[in-house]
Each structure stands twice: as C-alpha cells, then as structure tokens.
Image: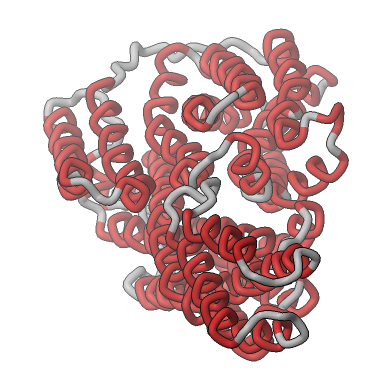
Amino acid sequence: MSPADWGALAVLLCATFVQLVDINIVNIAIPSIQSQLNTNFASAELIIAGYQMTFAAFLMLATKLGDRFGPKQIFLIGMFGFTISSLGCAMSENQVELVGFRLLQGAASATMFPQVLTHIQLEFPPSLRSKLLAIYGAVAGVAYLVGPATSGILLHLNPFGVGWRSIFLVNLPIGIVALVGGVLLLRRTVSPARVDVDYLGAALFGLFTAALVFPLAYGRESGWPLWLVLILIGSPIPLIAFILRERYRSTRGLEVLLPGELISTAVFRRGIVLTVIFFMAISPFLFAFTLYLQLGQNLSPLYAGLTTLPYAAGAAVLSAFSYRISRRLGKFALLLGSSILTAAMVLLFVLFQIRGASVDGFVVAPALVLAGAGFGIFEPSVNTVVLSGVSRRRAGVASGALLSVQQLAGALGIGILGLIYFSLLAASAQYATNYVAPAIRRQLAPFSTTAPQNGNLIRQFSSCVVARATERDPTVNPVACADLGNYVQSLSIPELQKPIILGFLLKDAQVAESVDFTRSIKYGTIYEMTLFLAAGLASLLLPRRGTGLTSEDQSTHTAPAS
C-alpha cells in the first residue's frame, strides 16, 4: 500500500472512531447537562437514544445513496454534517436545541458509516481486505466501549472551561482533518449502473422509528396523553407499509432498501428478533448504570467513567477471540455470550442486595468484567451466525439491516428501561425514607425539638424525598421540599440549631436518594437478565452453522454439512 492509501485508511478509521464513540460518550455527561440546561429525564434519554434512532433510520438509505452518488461524495457530506452538528451540540443553550442537534448528528453518522466499508472494499487490494477489516473492527469496538471513560476524563480536565461541551467540541478537529483528508485522499467512484433510491420507503422506516421511540421517551413526563398513546399503538403501521412497499418494488424489479429475499429468509427473520431482544438489554445497561453511579452514588464524572473500564476490558479481550469462538461453537456462541451476561446481571443483583448503597466501583468490577466478556462474545458472533445463513450477494445489505436494527433496539431499550427505572425510583422512595428515619430520630435527640415536632419533621422529610423521586422534571425543587425548609425555620427552637438540622436533613436526603437509586438499579437488573436469558433461548432457533448459500448459490456450489 502507498502512503496515500494508508492516509485514506486513517481518514476512514478516524471517521469510524468519532461516530461510534459518540453513541456512549454522552452517558457520563447527562447529570452535568441536566444541571446546566435544566434538562428533564425525557430529553436526557433522547440525547442518547435520539442519536441511535436517527442512525437506525438513515443507515439503509445512506447505503443506497453511496451506490447512487458515490461513496466519497456521501462520506464527505456525512462527515461535514457530523462536524457541524457536533458544533451545534456544543453551542446548544437549551434541551430542545441539544436534542435536535443530536438527531442530526445520528443521521450524519449513519450517512458516513456504510461508505467506510465500501471504500475498504473498493480501494484496497483484495489480499489486504481481511486484515483491514480486522483493524476496522478493532477500532469500532474500542470506540464503542471507551465512550464513558473518554467523557469522564474530558469532564474532569475541563479543557478551556467549557464543561460538558468538550465532549462535542473534541469532534471538531477530528472532523476537519477527516474532511480535508477525505477530499485529498479518497478516490471518487460512481456505480456504472444508475441506482434508484427508494426515498418513500426510507421515510416510512424513519416514521416508524420516531413513532416508536418518542412516545416512550416523553410519555412519563407528559402524563401519557391520548394522542401520544395512539402514536405508540400506531407505530407498527409505517413499518408494515414499509415492508409491503419493499415487496411491491421487489416484485417489479425495482431497487429496494430491504430485499424481499432477506425478509423471506427464516434465518434472517429469527436473527432480527434475536438482535432486537439482545440490544434492547445491552444498550440501556450503561445508560442506567452510569446514571446510578453519579446520581445514586454521587461519584464524580471521572470516577464514574473509569468505573466502566472493567466492562470495556472484558469486551475487548473476548471480542479478540470471538471469531474463533463463533467458528467453533456456531449459534452456541450466542448462547454462551448471553448466559455470561445473565450471570453478570445476577451477580450485580446479589451485590446490590448484600451491600446496598455501599456498593462501589471495586465491588462491581468483577460483574462488569463478566458483562463485558459476554458482550464481547455475543455482539461479533451474532453477525457471523446470522449472515452465514443468507445469500453472499445479500450479505452487505443484511449486515446494514442488522446494524440498523441494533441501533433502533438500543434506542427502544433506553426508552423502556427509562420507564421502568424511574417508575422504580418512585415506588422505592418511601422505602428509602423509612430506611433513614431512625437515623434522623437519633440526630434530633440532642436538639430542643419535641416528640410531635420530630414526627412532623420526619413526615415532611418523607414527603420531600417521595416528591423528588416522582417529580417529572428533576431540575424542579418540589413544593414538599420547600415546605420542609419552611417548617424547620418556623420551629420554636434556638436559631443556631436550625441550620444544623437543615444540614443533616440534607445529608440524610442524599442517603435516602442513594438507597432509592440502589434499590431501583437492583430491580432494574431483572429486566436485563430476563432479556439476556430470552436472547440465549432465541439463539437456539438459529441453525448451528449457516452455509452462507441460498438455493441460487447452491446451483454452483456444494454446501458443506452443517
């Protein structure tokens, strides 16, 4: 390879790194964003899930756009859009702007993504493709896993004093270098045949993703109005219309986003179901866990980010052996990976049950290593096993469809787990106040308050904690908490005692919130382990080893025994 070829590869890998690291880089920054922009939890979910949603919605369309207009042109458009939307995220002054720019960022990322693989296939010698794809896979895996740690380090260093905005500004120099390098080093290629792009089909699929994800994110905050419920119930309609349109176009020999041949392939359909189940569990795991570390354990962004490194380490090590494992075990590699993840969730549940709110990063590290190992086995293997059962000429389209489904399932999982998690917070709030009530009584003993006053204080403290847990907007100070402060000020006790009482009540409230978050994350692991177990069982429906050949392929090839 010439220096120019290595330069082109560097450009493609830089683009891959920034677009995948941005999936998880926001997790650690959510509390900082909430405090500065007064962001509610619904918008916080969409800041993360919205990126995945538009990534999923645009990915299949972007593949066809690359075929139609050339991968270089579409790559540069995507890279430009990603860089500009990153700047927009960094300059956002409210939650609406930030969510909007994150949606654009996800769409731009999807626009770039398939062009990278196309360039590797077209611009480099066939003898090097396997090696280059392995390098690409390693970069993609590292980028996806180190997002939280990268965010924690940036928030700790706080370059230029910009706080959470640094996680988006860091994309600018990389984006500019990739743009300039792309213009100079990538070769321009255009398909010799005119490719028809199904824009209406893409719009229908995008409408389906929006109708599925937005209601789950905003339903709790808005009180589930009828119109939002109807949108959620009606979300399958555009999906059905999309599938029917693809079949209609396919029967008439027109270009489609998702070939009917794939939809009618049992292995692919089962693989889609398996992918949805798994990624509905794995994607929201880091979202909920990093929120717990900061809001429940009051950890700094740096410590919270570094706490996720055992997960990244486990995934990195096992993913290096995943190809050998999937080659040897076939579909049972998926069962192995999901079983390890189920065991990790069970271990986390037990640790939360035994240690309660005293759980720290060192205690959960073994469970996180185990979870990472399960992910490292499952995620690469699912593509290998499912794609081995489809036609070779459809492998590229099938791979893109699987990735699109992964991102959509991740966004859906964040919405569902968000509903479960914050509902558990509300349900566990009274338990948390009962937990700290004896300590409050002991703390009040040396003061001049009477027994009835102590009882009123504990009741108002309980109302404050419950109101905080059930408040739809976490940036709002509930009336019950203001009433608690006013009640302390109204007590007929020496004035010097009042700030002391308020001080330890504030600390007790933090303890109660920690207990509440710990109890919620503990029961939230049941959602995770249930889906991981279901994914393992669903993997048994796949063939042990696909041949990679359809009847069309078998006319010229002899299929090996499975």
Choose between 36 and 397: the one closer to the eye: 36
Front residue (pair 464, 43):
464
Q: Could you tell whether 216 is left or right of 31 in the image?
A: left
Residue 430 locus on image (x, y percent): 47, 77
| Image-quadrant location for residue 251 | top left
Instruction: State the image quarter where residue 287 is shown.
Output: bottom right
Q: Is residue 297 above or below residue 106?
A: below
Q: Residue at x 76, y 35 (%)?
A: 163
Instruction: Tell me the quarter of the image containing the N terminus.
Output: top right
Judge whether residue 497 can be spotted in this image.
yes
162 vs 458: above or below: above
The quadrant the C terminus occupies is bottom left
Residue at the image point whose x is 65% and y is 36% from the top: 36
Q: Position of residue 72 (x, y in %)?
A: 58, 15
What residue is at 43 percent from the left and 25 percent from the top? 62
| Vertical order, 544 against 286 (above or below) | below
Query: Left or right: where does residue 411 sit relative to residue 229?
Result: right
x and y, in percent, of residue 282 in the image: 52, 62
For the question of whether residue 310 can be seen, the reply is no
Q: Which residue sits at x=38%, y=75%?
A: 534
